[in-house]
Each structure stands twice: as C-alpha cells, then as structure tokens.
Amino acid sequence: MSKNYWLDLFTWKTWKEFLDHGGNVSGFRKRLIKVAKRVRPGDYFLCYLTGVSRFIGILEVQSETYGDDSRIYEDDIFPVRFKVKVIYQLDPDTAVPIKDLRDKLSIFRNLKSPNAWTGSLRASPAAISQEDGDIIVAAVKAAVTNPIHKVYDEKKLWHRPQKYHSKLGPVTIPVDEKPEAEPKAETEGPITHEEIQYTLLKLGSDMGLDVWVARNDQNKSFNGNSFKNIPNLRVQLPRQFDEATNRTIEFIDVLWLHGDAIVAAFEVEHTTAIYSGLLRMSDLVSMQPNINLNLYLVAPDEKRTRIFDEISRPTFARLKPPLPQICKFIPYSKLIKEVKLLGSKVKFVKPEIIEELAESCEDKGH
C-alpha cells in the first residue's frame, strides 16, 4: 500500500527548534485538526522551508495525531502533534528549491498567474499528490546523496512576519510582494505601480485633500517626482484604532483624508499573484466591521475578471459586511483618462468624482 504525502511548513527558526528538540515531534495549529486526523503512521511529511522556498527534509509519521501543549516552539504552541522520524535532512544551501522542480510538479501546471502555485503552500498539513510527493522525495534523496550548494538570500531565510495586537488577538499584516512584470497600457506603453500611486496621490492633493502613501512606499517616486514632495502629504495618520488596525491602514497604498477622517482608501493591485490589497481590506473589515471607509481596488483593465473572481471567494464574500458590497473596482484606463481630461480644472472637482470611475464589485456580469 502506497504512503500518503503531506506538506509540513517550517520557518528557519521553527526548523531549528524542531531539530533542537530532538527532531521527533512535529506540530500544527489546532484549527487544522480535521486534516491532521487523516494522517496515518507511515505517511511522509515533506518539510518545506518558507522564505527561501526549498524542501529541507522528509519525515516519516510514527503515530496518530495527539494533543500536547508543551513548548517546542517559542512563538506558538502548535498543539496538534505527531511523533516523527527524520528520513532525510538537508541544510538551507543544499535544500531543494521548489522552482528546480517546476517542470515536474503538477502545482506548476495550467497556472492562471506566475505565482499561483504558492496557493498550494499556504498551510500545513496539506495533502500532496502521489505524483508530486514521489518527485519531491526523490529530489531530496538525491540532494542528500549528492549535495549541491546553492546560494540563497539570508534575509529571506530569517524573515518572520511581525505580529500586532488587535481585538482578535495577535495578527500579522500582509505586505506587497515585489512585482514580476509591468502590465502594458493599451496605447502608451508600460504602466507602473508607482505611476498609479502618484496619480491617486496627486489627484487627491489637487482637490485639496490630505493624502497618505503606504509606509513602505514613502521613499518612492514617479518620473522624478518624489512622493514626499506632493503637497498635503501626511507624515502621520490619526491613531483611531488598535495597533493591528492602525498598522493595516498604514500599509494601504493610498489614502485620501479630510482632517482626521479617511475619505477613500485605494489598493493598487498590479502584478502580485496573491492579492495583498484584498487581504489588507479583508483584515480591516474583520477587525473593524463597523469602520466607515470607501474602499477601491485599482488594477489593470485586463485584471477585471480576476479581481471579481477573487473578491467573490467565500473568505471575502462572507465577511460582515461582505467585501464585494463595500469595495469597488477602478480600471487603470479610466483613472488615467479622467485625470488627463480634468487638467487644471481638478481643483474645482469634489472627491465624489471617484465614484463615477468606480464599478461595484457586486456586479454579476463579469
């Protein structure tokens, strides 16, 4: 009878803690108990090192799942436990990069976007197909027998998401991934994330509003125009909420403000495969369901269908209030065209003009 394969996610820190504790117990979060109960002795855990995206080991399951709140890991309990045995073990520099297997693994086939494969690696334990499991085990075994040292980014190895306090308990805040490629405008060449941010910042400022750019983008510029030099750019936001909510708001791409009131919040969904902007908005609604914000997703025209598909997912559509009800879509072409048409008349325009460009995400005709 063939064994089953399961993904086992580790950071470099938790991998070291696992080994330091003896390398014979692997733990998972309580919410994944239903999946864990499907794991049987003799199955294999495929150990994936996040940050550097490499397979670093193979564990054989030695027991049924059991509960244990004793400390193995510093940052979390991971009380859903298994007794395990290390079958193969590598170091970060000899571990198998998942992209070395992209021509073999099924998770890389028929991708809707270049990074869509990462959706299979977001939580563990998660079932891995027999085909993919056999390939990964063979690759790790070969790397143990004939190790090849491959350079990796030390910063990514040690990257750990920072946690913030909220009413829901400790939470992490999603930050944008680096873009892979610039989408093309229909007539005028490439459009950049910075161009859209600058356009929104300048539009808000020209209408007499205060504006805010995401904290991690404050040193950016477009066509030699530094974001920091935009009139009415705020250097601090009003601290109206708990730490996690305030931190989430600080990383929204662009905000328009009138005094301490946030008039509109814009997330520019450029080329990232996982919509960090949608996640931020979702987090915001989850932490502050009564928050009164006009939310907008600004994206390339060709991403309209993907935006609507993503926002309709249960994780967003079942929020209270549902994200599709309170978030609207603005295509790049409409925004850029409108700003050009306004020209010097923009100072006489009210912020409500943005509503004329926006499309409800509840529309069904996508």
Image (spheres, rainbow, N blue to C red):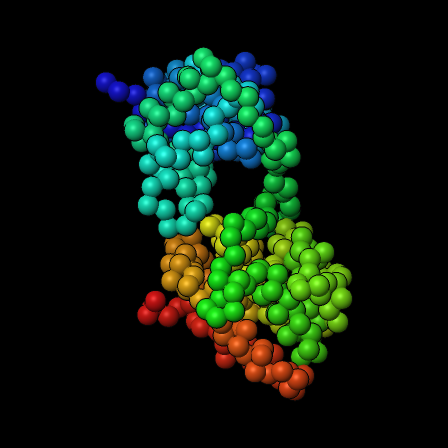
108 lies left or right of 52: left
The outermost residue toward the left is: 1
Q: Can you tell which quarter of the image residue 98 is in?
A: top left
Name the residue: 41% across, 50% down: 113
| Rendered location of residue 47, percent (x, y) | 46, 25
Q: Does residue 343 appear anywhere in the picture?
A: yes
Q: Can you tell which quarter of the image residue 364 is in?
A: bottom left
- Name the one closer to the observer, 119 or 32: 119
| Rendered location of residue 215, percent (x, y) | 68, 55
Quadrant of the snapshot with the C terminus? bottom left
| Rendered location of residue 49, percent (x, y) | 52, 29
Number of marks in picture: 0
- Name the one closer to the observer, 90 or 189: 189
Name above or below for residue 300 compared with residue 287: below
140 lies left or right of 341: left
Quadrant of the snapshot with the N terminus? top left
Name the residue: 71% across, 65% down: 225
Name the residue: 42% across, 17% down: 142
Name the residue: 52% across, 69% down: 188
223 lies left or right of 23: right
| Rendered location of residue 352, percent (x, y) | 57, 80
Q: Does residue 66 appear anywhere in the picture?
A: no
